[in-house]
Amino acid sequence: MLAIERLEKIKAILQTEKNVKISQLSERLNVSEMTIHRDLKPLIDDNYVIKTFGGVSLATSTPINDTINEQCIYCHRPVHGKMTYKLILVNKQTEFACCAHCGLLRQMQLGDEVVQAISYDFLRQTTISVPRAFFVMDTSLDLGCCQPQVLSFEWKEHADKFVQGFGGEVYTFKEILAILQEKMSGNDHSCHP
Ligand SMILES: [Zn+2]
Ligand SMILES: [Zn+2]
């Protein structure tokens, strides 16, 4: 099978199944996992799919209109497109949070029930898989959502540059969870400013 045919097959599989493991694609298309990785590269670069643990998911860009009537699952503010954080649960239910602050806190509450978490790159507005994202806290740019404010970035380089201009610290997913938990356990803040 030609690479281009495989690509069409992979797209068709993703359209119907939404999430798929690399190992499954390799088996079904009868090529090595390395070949699958190579096939997926352009799809990932185009934000057609996002990487998940051991596989890929169809990137679902959530149009602003779809979320306009949603309330943040954590603080009940209205959800607005740009900073939306989306959680997909084991039972296929979807939850929206107004920003990464609430999304991360909700994700901590749910633990293993979350199969996928998606947020938007603050600069490019592309969908990003949260565990691979970089987060900026304590920046001087106040976007008026929940405090302490958390912004998400796809690339560390972009987060670093942002911090150079607006101040703050860059954290990985694991780090931000720890820091957020620590900050939320104090009494010097509230979700509603
Ligand atoms: Zn919220
Ligand atoms: Zn918020």
Image (cartoon, rainbow, N blue to C red):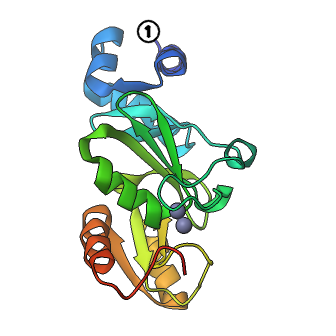
On screen, residue 187 above or below 130: below
On screen, residue 112 above or below 123: above
Viewer can see residue 154:
no
Q: Is residue 115 left or right of residue 164?
A: left
Q: Amino acid at mark 1?
A: Met
Dividing the image into four quarters, tell me where ligand 2 lies.
bottom right
- Name the image quarter holding residue 102: bottom left
In the image shown, does 101 or 125 lie closer to the viewer?
Answer: 101
Q: Which residue is mark 1?
A: 1
Number of numbered discs overlaid on the protein picture: 1
Q: Residue at x 25, y 63 (%)?
A: 174
Q: Is residue 69 left or right of residue 52?
A: right
| Secondary structure under the numbered disc 1 in the rendered image | loop
Residue 1 coordinates in the image, percent (x, y):
43, 9
Viewer can see residue 124:
yes
Q: Residue at x 37, y 77 (%)?
A: 170
In the image shown, does 43 or 5 lie closer to the viewer?
Answer: 43
Q: Residue at x 27, y 71 (%)?
A: 181
On screen, residue 155 above or below 150: above
In the image shown, does 62 or 121 lie closer to the viewer?
Answer: 62
Residue 31 coordinates in the image, percent (x, y):
30, 16
In the image shown, does 133 or 83 lie closer to the viewer?
Answer: 83
